[in-house]
Amino acid sequence: MSGETDTRRIRIFDTTLRDGEQSPGASMNRAEKLEVAHALVNLGVDVIEAGFPIASPGDFESVREIAEVVRGATVCGLARCNPKDIDRAWEALRGAEQPRIHVFLATSAIHREFKLRMSQDEIVERAIQGVKQAAKVCDDIEFSPEDAARTERDFLCRVVEAAIKAGATTINIPDTVGYTTPSEMRACIGTLMDRVPNMDRAVLSTHCHDDLGLALANTLAAVEAGCGQVECTINGIGERAGNCALEEVVMALKTRQELFGCETGIDTRRLVPTSRLVSTITGMDVQRNKSVVGRNAFAHESGIHQDGMLKEPSTYEIMRPEDVGFSKTDLVLGKHSGRAALADRAHALGFSITAEQLQHVFDRFKELADKKKEIYDGDIAALIQQEISGQVDESWTLARFEVASGTGRQPHVSLTLVHNAQEYTTEVEQGDGPVDAAFWAVERLTGYQVVCKDYRVRSATLGRDAQGDVQLEIEHDGQIYKGVGVSTDTVEATILAMLNSINRIAAVEKPVPAADA
C-alpha cells in the first residue's frame, strides 16, 4: 500500500447503536440513541447502523426516529434474511434521507450445522431471496455472511457472488467471534477480490470483534487488502470483548497515511467528546490507558519522557492531543458567562442540545458557578451529560436534604421530595453510611423497592471542589434501570441518580403512592 500515490477514501460504518448497544449493560433509551446519532453525524461517520428493528418495539421506534430526524449520513437497519425482518427494517428506515438495509445470514460450517441446520445450497438460496427482497424497496443493500472468517473460502466466494448478483451493493466480511488473524484476514479479502467475478460491483467491508485483541489489526489488514469500508464502534464497545474501536482505526489510518494511503471523513477533533458522551450514556467507563481517548493517552510521568516532550513533543507523541479532542486549556467559563458562551462550549465539546436543554444546563451551571471557584470543561460536560441521560419525566424531584454521619454513630438523613406538586419528608437513621441511608430514604418516600446492582462515583474534573458524577444501576421487578446524578456533594449526586432511575421506573409503571411522612 505504501507505494500507491492515490489516496483511497475509507467509509466509516458505525454500529455503536446496534452492536455496541448489545454489550451487556450498555442499553440506551430513544433520547440517548438520538443524541448519540447526532454526535456521530457531527463526527463525520458515513453510515450509522441505528439498530435491529425487529428485535423489539423500542428498537424499531429508535431506528424510525433516527431515520426521520438524522441528516448527513446513511442510516442503516439490520435484518436477518427473513421476510418479516426485512419488511420491519424498511418500515423503520423509509423516512431516511439515505436508507440502507443490512441483511445477514450465517455461512460457516459450524453455524450451518448447529444453528441453522441448512445445507450450502439452502444458504445460498436464502441469501439471494433476502437480498432481492430488500433491493425491491431500497437501493443501498449490505449483505453479511455471518462468521465469514470461519467459512470455507470456496463457499464464501460462491455466496458473495450470488449476493452481489441479487443486488447487494456492499459486502461485509465479519470476523464474528474474533477468531482470525491479520494474515488470514488479508488472504480472505484478497481471495474475494481475485475470485469473485462481480466483486467490482460492490464495496468490500469488514467487521472485526476483539475476542483475541486483534480487532484493529484485522481491520487494518482488511484495508490493506482492499476493503473500502470498516465497521466499528465508539470506544470499541459491543458483544463480548467488543468491536474494532472507531477512534483507533481512524487515527491509525491518519497517523500512518504514508503506509496505508487512505483517509476518512472523520473530524478527529470530536473523537474525545464523542467517546465521553457514549461512555456516560452507556455507563461503560473508558480505561485510563485506552489508546487515543483514554485519560493517560497523552500523559507523561517518566522524567526522560517529560524532558523529551519539553524539547520536542513528537519525541514521545505520535499524535497531537488537540487533534483528537483533548484541550490543553481546560478552564473556559465562569459565573459571569452567558448562554451563548455555554452553547458555543457545548458544541466545541461535541454535544448537540436543544434550546430547552441548554436552558436547563445553564441554570445548573449558574448554581455550580456559585459553589466552585473554577469551572472546567469536565464540569460542563458532566452537566450536559446529566441533562441528556436524565431525559425522563421528573415524577419525583429533590427539594432538600440533610445528612449527619460520623465514626461510631448511625448515619441520619432527613429527605424531602416533591411528587405531584406536594412535598413528602422522611427521616432515616439506618444503613452503613450516608449514601446507604440516602438509598433507604428514597425507597421509603417513593415506595419503590429496588436493589442496587452497580454504583460508581467519579470526579468530573480535578481539585477538592470537583463535581461528583454518580452512575448507578438498580433492579426493580427483574428489570435494570440506570440513573445519573451530578453535584459537588456526593450524597446529593447519589440522591439525584437514585431519583433519575426511580423516574425511569415510574415512566413505565403506574405511579406508587408516596409514603406518609
Image: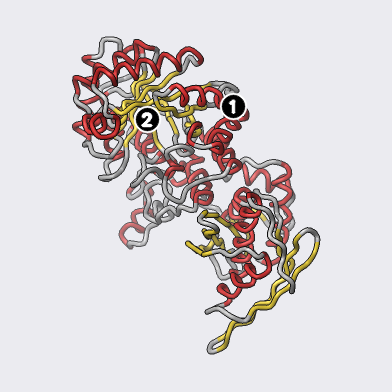
Camera-nearest residue between 371 and 72: 72
The quarter holding residue 355 reads: top right
- Does residue 326 appear in this view? no
Residue 117 horizontal side relative to residue 502, left or right = left
Q: Name the residue under label 2.
A: 230
Task: Please state, as top left, top right, bottom left or bottom right, where the C terminus lies in the image.
Answer: bottom right
Image height of 212 relative to 48, above or below: below
Amino acid type for the residue under numbered disc 1: Arg
Q: Residue at x 41, y 40 (%)?
A: 247
Q: Which secondary structure, mark 1? A: loop
The quarter holding residue 193 reads: top left
Amino acid type for the residue under numbered disc 2: Val
Q: Which secondary structure, mark 2? A: strand
Task: Please state, as top left, top right, bottom left or bottom right, where the N terminus lies in the image.
Answer: top left
Q: Mark 1 points at which residue?
A: 71
Residue 403 horizontal side relative to residue 294, left or right = right
